[in-house]
Image (cartoon, coloured by chain):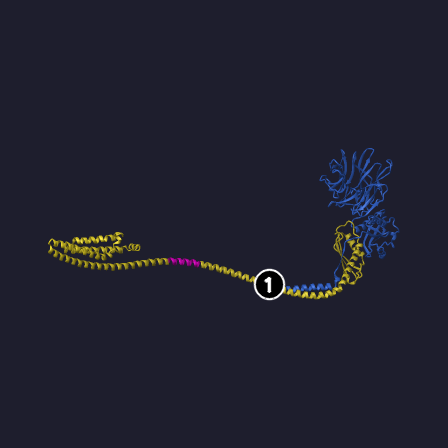
Chain colours: A blue, B yellow
Amino acid sequence: MYNNLRSFAVGFAALCLMTLAVSPAQAALQVNITQSSNSAIPIAISPFGSSQGQLPVDVAQIASRDLASTGLFEVFPRSNMLARPSSPERVNYNNWRTQNVSNLVVGSATPNGQGGYKITFNLLDVAQGRPVASYQLNAGPNQLRQAGHMVANLIYQRFIGKKGYFLSRIAYVTVTGNSLENRKFRLVVSEYDGSHPATVYSSQDPIMSPSWSPDGSKLAYVAFNVYKGISSIRVQDLATGNVRTIVSGPGVNGAPAFSPDGNRIALTKSTNGDSNIFVYNLASGQMRQLTHSGSIDTAAAWSPDGSHIAFTSDRGGQPQIYEMSSQGGQVQRLTYDGQSNRRADFSPDGESLAMVQKSANGFRIAIMDLSNNNVRIVSDGPMDDSPAFAPNGQVILYAKQGGSNSLATVSIDGEAKSTLSQAGEVREPAWGPLGY
Amino acid sequence: MFDLLGKIGEHWRAVLFAVVLHALLAAFLIFGIQFVHSSASKGDRGLSIVEASVVNTADQPERSNPPADQQEAPQPKPKPEQKPDRQAEKKAEQKAQAEKAAAAAAARKKAKQKAEKKAAQEQAAKQAAKQAAQKKAAQEKARKEAEQKAAREKAQKEAEQKAAREKAQKEAAAKKAAEEKAKREAAEKARQKAAEEKARQEAEAKKKAAEQKARAEAEAKRKAEAKRKAAEEAAKKAAAAKKAREAAAKSALNKMLAKEAAGRQNAVNQQALARYVQAIKDKVEGNWIRPPGVANISCKVKVTQLPGGQITNVQLLGSCGSPAVDRSVVQAIRKSDPLPTPPSDNLFQSEIEFIFKPDQ
């Protein structure tokens, strides 16, 4: 029996060997992929067709710019297109293949009978020569622009795996005028890329530290009255323009930050020369002091779950980032890298912290992984300030100061950088919610 | 001497009896003589007395040393023998004295008396001699009797003693024998017991030994069997190995020859295969645009192709980490269609396994 088995095994092994010897090509070839292309995703968005001729808003163009702004997509110029199909059936894949366009978006908009449009578009895989995804969305009468952003969001999410932020808005402060007389501070709200700016508040006196409410309907910010020598923290409803001043007085009233649930605002208030973190309850109007140090504690930032507040304090000599319970107490220092660290912002997933790190290379944006405290510098400096995570966590918006004051974005891996063109000096950007 | 005393002590009755007998004999003799004297002549009284006293005195020293009661019986033997000699001497002296007295009497003129006296004396002497002879004979007889008796007694005694001794010896022997017997028996018993114990132990030991032996034998047998089997196995194996070696040598020779020829070809093939794989790798990697912000990508993709490199199927074997990554991987492969073709047809493999692992 045993011998039989053994002889069988031997025979089987021999058979295997023979098989191998006879046809070695049967075994799977193994190819290890260890590198990826550094290139961006090649995509072409053909102009959306319309049964009524040209659309009032170039939706394809808006989506193309959105995707291109991320640095993650290489958008094929419309001028190079051999054909501009608006439906999959009319696509000659070979044309796109020869031009190395891997992905093609074709779509069309038809009036929905209510002044708006029904937009249909498809994502085509040129290599396979077929549609791989199909989308539909409705746009109101004046929402074709938003529809364009939405197209970009959907494509972005398909390729990148995260929600696109092309419908989100940002707020920032601009300063214009050279002299004290004509100097103008403006609180501006724009689209995510700085386009379509709208001034929501302006003053000859400084405006500081805008902060978005979680739903994107309100802004909290600091307004000064130099003549009276007071500063105020204001909450402004963007839709109505209504303003509510929650704290006002001499000394420091600054750095407001909406809690994730939108019901409270953490802020900095000075008493007897010391600045401390307080939390203001919007419903009750009550204010509670969280820190009691004899140093400067400021720039509070809520963790996404609302359980902690990070803040900047010079209690250790140099400004560093500390963290405490959002009820106060349990203070612990988070940063040790560089000469100093300030102005923390939690990533939307709460796993990392963006901050301004001062080092021999100046002030640069750094991202610290909270799971292991590893710090990664993502900006070039030398005078970068006010980092703010995009609502999808993939990009950080910050202010470049010094020679040319402007807003810039950088992907969290530090790879994709872009500058948002803005006139004048731009300060303290804040990135609002996704917007959809 | 001490033996004798011991014997006397042992047989005091016989001794006492002998003494008493001797005493009676002596009394008889003395009274008999006195009776004769008294009846025959009164003048001899002094002589008799002298004689008797002499006898007594002569006897005394002999008796002095040994203890009185016990010495008497054996003594009579020499007394009767010595007496006649001394008596003869004394008789001669007495004769001389008598002759002197006769001479003196004659001298005083008592020749008749003298003669008479002499005759009487002679007669007396004769009588005395006769008596002495008689006495001597009697004594002799008595002596003889005594001797006989003594001999008898002695013999008896000796016999008795002997018997007693023998008896004692016998008894002692018997006792000894009994003791020895008992001893022997006890010893025998002990021996037996010991022997039994020994036998038992031996039996046990034997049994154990037998068991052990049996076991050892069984073990040895088993071992031997195992050894034999192992040896057989080894022999078989060795034979097989030999066969295999021979076959291997044979085929090795063939292979060597083939290898000589194929070696270069193989090397060329290996290099070509490596180039082929690298070409596929380069193309897919060039087409793979990895989604940003996704770490620890790891997945396998099974791809089937036609000889011209046309991809017929792409199968993701598990997720790479996220749908976007999965899509990027599949698209990278799809975009690489057609895959590079191998430099020679024998390097073609219809199935390719891509392993995406950029984060090692």
Residue A289 falls inside the magenta stretch: no
Q: Of B50 and B155, which appears nearest the observer?
A: B50
Task: Measuring from the top left, give residue A154's x and y in whole percent.
Answer: 81, 50
Is residue B96 something one can see in this rendering? yes
| Image quadrant assignment for residue A400 | top right
* B9 with respect to B119 (left or right): right
Residue furthest to the front: B107
Magenta: main secondary structure equals: helix
Q: Is residue B183 magenta?
A: yes
* Callout 1: chain: B
Q: Quadrant of residue B93?
A: bottom left
Residue A46 place in picture, x, y as percent: 85, 52
Q: Residue at x 48, y 60 (%)?
A: B202
x and y percent of residue A40 in the render? 82, 51
Which quadrant would the N terminus of chain A be assigned to in this image? bottom right
Image spot of residue A169 (x, y percent):
82, 44
Secondary structure state at the residue bearing disc 1:
helix
Over which residues does the magenta segment extend?
Answer: B178-193
**Residue type highlighted by circle 1:** Lys
Residue B349 visible in this rendered orientation of the protein? no
Residue under label 1: B227
